[in-house]
Image (spheres, rainbow, N blue to C red):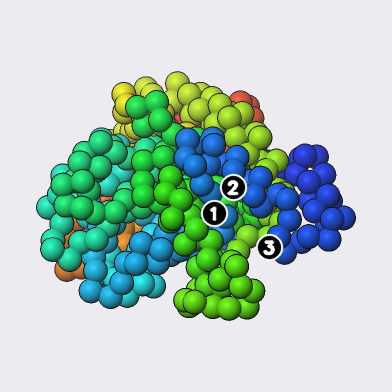
Amino acid sequence: MIPVAEPSLGEEELNNVVEAIKSGWISSKGKFIPEFEEKLAAYCGTKYGVATSNGTVALHLALATLEIKEGDEVVVPTLTFAATANAVIYTGAKPVLVDSAPDYWCIDPEEIGKAVTPKTRAIMPVHLYGHPCDMDPIMDIANRHNLYIIEDAAEAHGAEYKGRKVGSFADIACFSFYGNKIITTGEGGMCLTNDESLAVKMRILRDHGMNPQKRYWHDVVGFNYRMTNMQAAVGVAQLNKLDKFVEKKREVAGLYSSLLNSVEGVSLPPEMPWAKNVYWMYSILVQDSFGMDRDELMRRLELKGIETRPLLAPLHLMPPYKKSESIAVAEELASRGISLPSSVNLTAEQTRYIANAIRGQRS
């Protein structure tokens, strides 16, 4: 079976983990944690990084640091992984779910504008499947209404908006390093910010709310959201390879597109003129003219040893977040979308095999 995603790990990761183990610093202290934080912040063009135990808690830590609370609203795309909305709910606030832009699948700035109320405190744009959001109008809305921006960049390491890395536009930006992400630490996450006071506050909340000058003294209720030195050791090695991983992702995407471009009923993943898509997943839409529906194509590809995944289901259709009204674009995308194998380990031969298998179903 050709997997949808798999990590690319080698000697550098192994050597760093061995060094961490030999140092005795295997928990939440050790040299690799600040190194990973500083290097990712510098890579994205921000000043401060705060490593966390996973991407979901990075989102929650960001919201808690900005004092989002019960009675507040946060605008969130409905087409995203559940962690985005769940983190809002953890604070007692309400995620307000809005539709996607049809031409690039991320949150639609026009829909954000319609969703803002006096209770709105923040906007949480998600750079979906490696494609950046249209950040200029989102920042305009935030500035106009005095709202925070929290970027969910879990799927978009290295992606760019108008030549600038994602993760550099928000009050706080959040990354995930789960095993299927472009770079991984197994589990793990990070918050980035340019605001020193927010960085200090995040570090305190991340470490049980402990006063950094007075050990075992807690001025506030915090969390245990710390990353281990062994995770960070893997992260440092992975970050050194990120540009090569992005180059490979885009190479795989280019080959897929060249092979699938002429297939009737297949819509290719978007890349807007202002965007650098890193194609975390190479996701296509199966149109009616293809001759079979998305689920049947997935079933037939599985029989050929090709693992696929449906596009994320819109949150507003699920019991914890359910809304009575339709959110049309997200529903359409989710009903037609398939993510194809997109690992940096994918060979050109495998990519051609997958594309030809899709072409063969059409014929």
Residue that mark 3 sits on: 28
Residue 120: percent from the left, percent from the top? 20, 61
Residue 170: percent from the left, percent from the top? 36, 46
Q: Give the structural element (helix, strand or loop) at label 1.
A: strand
Q: Nearer the viewer, residue 183 or 74?
A: 74
Q: CA distance from mark 1 to mark 3?
A: 12 Å
Q: Give the structural element (helix, strand or loop) at label 3.
A: loop
| Residue occupying the point 15% across, 57% down | 116
Mark number, residue 37: 2
Q: Give the structural element (helix, strand or loop) at label 2.
A: helix
Residue 118: percent from the left, percent from the top? 13, 63
Query: Which badge, 1 or 2, comes first in the chain's sequence?
Result: 2
The three-letter amino acid code for the residue at tag 3 is: Ser
Query: Which badge, 2 or 3, comes first in the chain's sequence?
Result: 3
Quick check: 30 left or right of 84? right
| Residue occupying the point 31% across, 62% down | 315
Snapshot quadrant of residue 51: bottom right
The three-letter amino acid code for the residue at tag 2 is: Glu
- Marks 1/2 in contact by CB < 8 Å: the verdict is yes
The local crowd at label 1, few if under 14, some if 14 to 19, many if 20 or more residues have their Cα within 10 Å, is many
Mark number, residue 50: 1
Quick check: 352 left or right of 79? right
Snapshot quadrant of residue 8: top right
